[in-house]
Amino acid sequence: MSENDIVREFLLGFVKIHVLHHAVEGEVYGQALMDELARHGYKIGPSTIYPLLRDMEKSGYLQRSDRVVAGKVRKYYRATQQGSAALVSVQDKIRELVSEVLPPGK
């Protein structure tokens, strides 16, 4: 496994948490998430975000609703109760990890 693959694997976990965070706040869809993640420096394309959303839905963290927008079906996702609970649990782990991994003041 190359260094890029390893970094990508770690960052994908952060992306999932970021997606879940926004899905708890309100409905999200693929392109908007790609744009949001790009603002934070993540270069996530359709071949990554759409399978990720499907996997998170299949795992019970997201629920999907389809709507026609400008003549096309757009899939909107929102966090389920399981997804909201998972985010709260992950937030506690993130706080603990950050306090251990990052030097004070960072």
Image (spheres, grey):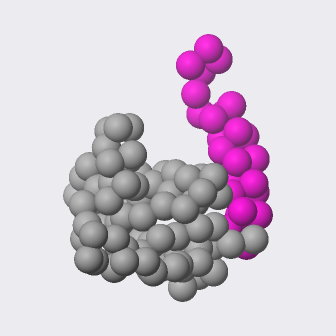
Magenta residue span: 82-106
**The magenta stretch spans residue 24:** no
Determine the residue located farthest toward the bottom in the rendered image: 58
The image quadrant of residue 41 is: top left
Residue 39 lies, with reference to residue 102, above or below; the image says: below
Residue 102 vertical position relative to residue 82 in the rendered view, above or below: above
Quadrant showing the N terminus: bottom left
Quick one: 85 or 7, which is closer to the camera?
85
| Residue at figure coordinates x 32%, y 48% from the top left | 35
Left or right, 17 with reference to 68: right
Q: Quadrant of residue 100?
A: top right
Where is residue 26 shown, x and y percent of the image?
60, 57
- Residue drawn at (27%, 69%), measured in percent from left and top? 70
Where residue 66 sits: x, y (%)?
Answer: 45, 80
* Residue 49, quarter of the rendered image: bottom left
Image coordinates for residue 69, horizontal then vertical, percent: 34, 71
Any part of residue 6 in sight: no
